[in-house]
Image (spheres, grey):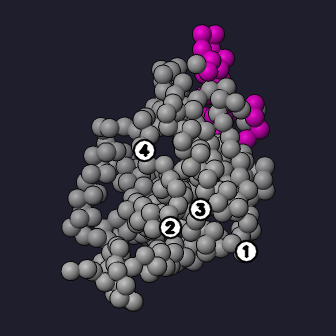
Amino acid sequence: MRLRCRICGERAVARAGPGRRYLCARHYLEHFERRVAKTVEKYRLLRGVRRLLVAVSGGKDSVALLHVLHRLYRGRVELVGLTIDLGIEGYSTPQVEFARRNFEALGIDYRVVGLAEEYGFTIDLASRRRRLVRRPTCSVCGIVKRYVMNRIAIEVGADAIATGHNLDDLSLFTLMSIAQGRIDDLVKLVPRTEKMGALVPRIRPLALVSGKETLTYVVLLGAPFHHENCPHAPSDGLRPELSAMLERLEDRNLEFRKMMYTNIVSNLIPRISRPDDKAGTGTCTICGMPASGKICSFCRIRMRLTEHPKIGVE
């Protein structure tokens, strides 16, 4: 028997919401966009934002973010795109190409920043030289992305930076922070971080929708996106184990991730007594960007990779 949309009776293509209602393509897209709009409104994500830098990797979540912001807020907020070529062999080039295709299809101005061309190193190089960098590859990648996003946001005069972190990501990072005793890190995982010194506010409009929902959204839109997982993503350890645990809990309670994350954001984070954070108020003596010490984390990584006598961009 062909399943029908609970709203209009047309052929259903997906199930959505706490009641798991069957919806046709049109009503699923409307449902998803309504969920995002409610998140934006609830957490006042676009407060004071006239120009928004949208970070797009080319994957499903960032592509969904770009399209939903364009569909909901074009004419109200000026969108500027950013994609970063991280220099990961066999992975970064198609990612950048998918990001370009989406920017150009929507007529959005964008910037492409290549690590190798602009900074003289890549994530592949950082991975090969982990002992020299003294950080795991994923940690280096996170520092690089945050640095470049903030730098470009300042250059283009953006009032905020939008990233494609979804509910799966944020609930996982939240649980990892608690499990590892990094309670102060929770304040960075809210749907909107505020301006601190030269650090541009960051917003996460997909904070209350899951990865499965963003995948369904981009597929129904027909938007091109990159399917592959990063080759540097860890296959074992705490992160994949906690992710699998959250999946099992979600199977039993469809609202578990949302309940956990929103309760932590609303009830726990406001009670955290956070020590003074100088990360956004100091200035790096090398690049002039925000730093907690004399030299920012990005410049320390870059110097270790590019100024060591035996290495360069390989």
Residue 268 left/right relative to 300: left
Q: Which residues are magenta?
A: 286-313
Q: Which one is in front in this view, the residue at disc 4 or the one at disc 2?
A: 2
Quadrant of the image containing the C terminus: top right
Q: Residue at x 29, y 57 (%)?
A: 246
- The disc labelled 2 sits on which kind of residue? Leu
The secondary element bearing badge 3 is classed as helix
Within the magenta stretch, is there residue 253? no
- The disc labelled 4 sits on which kind of residue? Glu
Q: Which residue is mark 1?
A: 75
Residue 225 left/right relative to 180: right
Q: CA distance from mark 4 to mark 3?
A: 19 Å
Question: Of label 3 and label 2, which has the lower sequence position?
Answer: 3
Question: Of label 4 and label 2, which has the lower sequence position?
Answer: 2
Give the vertical position of 114 relative to 185 (above or below): above
Question: Mark 1 near mark 3, Cβ–Cβ under 8 Å?
Answer: no
Q: Which residue is mark 2?
A: 221
Within the magenta stretch, is there residue 309? yes
Q: CA distance from mark 4 to mark 2?
A: 19 Å
Question: Which label is found at residue 228?
Answer: 4
The secondary element bearing badge 2 is classed as helix
- How many neighbours does mark 4 have within 10 angstroms: few (below 14), some (14-19), or many (20 or more)? few
Quadrant of the image containing the N terminus: bottom left
Question: Mark 1 near mark 2, Cβ–Cβ under 8 Å?
Answer: no
- How many neighbours does mark 2 have within 10 angstroms: few (below 14), some (14-19), or many (20 or more)? some
Q: Foreground residue, 135 or 27? A: 27
